[in-house]
Amino acid sequence: MQKVHQVDKPRIGLLNVGTEAGKGSELTKQAYSLLENSRVHFIGNVEARDLLDGVCDVVVCDGFSGNLVLKTIEGTAKMLFSMLKEELTSSFSSNLPREY
């Protein structure tokens, strides 16, 4: 984030099931402790539902959880674009003059 997007002090969040420090698996609890005691700008746990709202600049998570989040976002975007396309094309075709 610093090099690519010129964010001087990127906010680092740990993906978890809640924002409270004691939440999550042993792995996320240990990661929380390591991040909290590191030199990065750690903001704490973040929930998946808040990721697209820009709650943090960098999300830390295990590969399995990260893949689930990415696939869910991709699937949601695909569904929304499909619905939007269907709605736009149906309203366009319904406004065309009918031949008798």
Image (cartoon, rainbow, N blue to C red):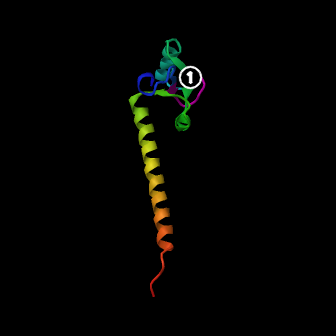
Q: In this view, does 73 lie above or below 38?
A: below
Farthest residue to the front: give it.
Answer: 6
| Residue at mark 1 | 44
- Can you give x and y, in whole percent of width and height, for residue 3 in the image? 41, 23
Specify few, some or many for label 1: CA neighbours under 10 Å numbering under 14, 14-19, or 20 or more.
many
Q: Which quadrant is the N terminus positioned in?
A: top left
Where residue 66 sits, quadrant-wise, is top left
Characterize the magenta stretch by its predominant secondary structure.
loop
- The image shows residue 83, relative to residue 71, as above or below, that is below
Q: Position of residue 65 (x, y in %)?
A: 43, 33
Residue 82 sits above or below residue 53 on the image: below
Residue furthest bottom as drawn: 100
Residues in magenta, as a range: 13-22
- The reply to whether the magenta stretch includes residue 43 is no
Residue drawn at 47 percent across, 81 percent down: 98
Q: Tell me the residue at 48%/75% (across/down).
A: 96
Q: Residue furthest right?
A: 20
Locate residue 18, reporting x and y percent.
58, 30
Amino acid type of disc 1?
Answer: Gly
